[in-house]
Amino acid sequence: MQYATITGWGKCLPPAILTNHDLATFIETSDEWIRPRTGISQRHISHVNTSELASVAAKRALAAAGLDASQIDMIILATASPDTLIPNIASTVQANIGAQCAAFDINAACCGFLYGMGLANAQIQSGQCQRVLVIGAERLSFYLDWSRRETAVLFGDGAGAVILEATDTKQGVLAYELNNDPSCREILSAGFGTKMDRFDADSLDFFIQFDGQEIFKRAIRGMGQLSKKVLEKTGTNKDDIDLVIPHQANERIIDTLVSRMKIDKSKAFINIANYGNTSAATIPIAICDALEQGRINAGDTILSCAFGAGLTSAAMLLKWGDRVTPIAESDAELPPCDSTGLELVKRAADYFLSKAQ
Ligand code: ACO
């Protein structure tokens, strides 16, 4: 039996940071409201397109795996904020890293990375691929109406990538569950697409909107149910879990999730304070951070789960392999940014604020 295990990992966070205090300079909010309600202190704002974030993360993942791009059989890029819809931006990454293989984008919102991992695992198990590059990358700052405090405070930009490689050893992806509940499509949306009326300026004002409390409840239920299923599927006891890497939408969602699953909070990896919700990028970024912080050890059992627009939900049980350090490091970097996070969002904020008056 073939298994698919993570052998490389890389992240890319754009350098400009927007703090809660920065946000309070142009919308009616405060660090005192945002931090206790969400766990977020700051988020990164990108000065480049999603594909550039994805390409740097991909180059770092390749170096960590000790691989050349020519050895990759497939690129799966999960994003809801591509720089172009046609062509897909997996092809942009492919050109940037110099790979010759299949390449495509998927959109399963915040679950995109785990959906991509599921697809990659199936390709490896079937023997079709030996090595798949799975990326989660987002530039959600593009989608935000910066005059709406309900949504503006929650999201950030970034990218993370992993290399999944075939192995005969029982490690890597042990089980996963993917689901979608279409009855709640409308409670979380960004109206960007062909349903926009190109002759109506208002219709071109697309932005993320959601029913936060409804999502809060459904996120806990969806992630909890699928996590239980992957544990049952593999006969894993919750006490055998070494680390939980959940989607980072709100620290209170994570607290409630682990408390309901009766898992000690110290086992939950939480980095939302630094990044906000980076949708499909949250889990691969968290994997990188967890490795950097020594939170992942060889042979660890890791539960990862996510929830997002659609409403998608996903859970995956992983057994980490033998290596927790990169084979090599890439010198790939983004082009320099000479603006602050506040400067990067201010033009959009002024536009939306003047429209709102
Ligand atoms: N700053 C200050 N006050 C605010 C802000 C803000 N940024 N946002 C809302 N408020 C106000 C509201 O206007 C309201 O005021 P009122 O009582 O005078 O009417 C009050 O704070 C409480 O608002 P609620 O919406 O009830 O706040 P809640 O505690 O539910 O927190 C939040 C809102 C953080 C959005 C929460 O519901 C949440 O995290 N939901 C799930 C996350 C989510 O929806 N993520 C979207 C992406 S989906 C995904 O990634 C899975």
Image (cartoon, helix red, strand yellow):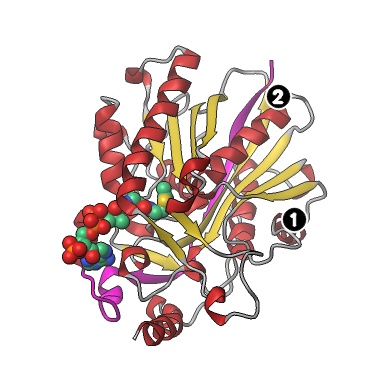
Q: Is residue 262 above or below residue 109?
A: above
Q: Quadrant holding ligand 1?
A: bottom left
Q: Position of residue 295 (x, y in %)?
A: 37, 37
User: Which residue is more in the foreground, 188 or 127?
Assistant: 188
Q: Is residue 69 above or below residue 146?
A: above
Magenta segment: 1-30
In the rendered structure, which disc, 2 or 1, sits on the residue that comes first in sequence? Answer: 1
Where on the picture, by quarter, is residue 293? top left
The dot on residue 94 is 1
User: Which residue is more in the foreground, 196 or 310?
Assistant: 196
Q: Quadrant of the C terminus?
A: bottom left
What is the secondary structure assignment of the residue under circle 1?
helix
**Distance Cα–Cα, label 2 vs label 1:** 23 Å
Q: Is residue 167 above or below residue 33?
A: above
Residue at 52% x, 42% y is 182
Q: Is residue 22 magenta?
A: yes
Q: Are marks 2 and 1 in contact (CB under 8 Å)?
A: no
Q: Position of residue 304 (x, y in %)?
A: 45, 34
Residue 295 in view (yes/no): yes
Q: Is residue 79 magenta?
A: no
The dot on residue 125 is 2
Residue at 72% x, 31% y is 123
Q: Residues within 10 Å of mark 1 (few under 14, many from 20)?
A: many
User: Which residue is more in the foreground, 310 or 44?
Assistant: 310
Q: Quadrant of the N terminus?
A: top right
Residue 146 in the figure: left or right of residue 97: left
Q: Position of residue 173 (x, y in %)?
A: 57, 27
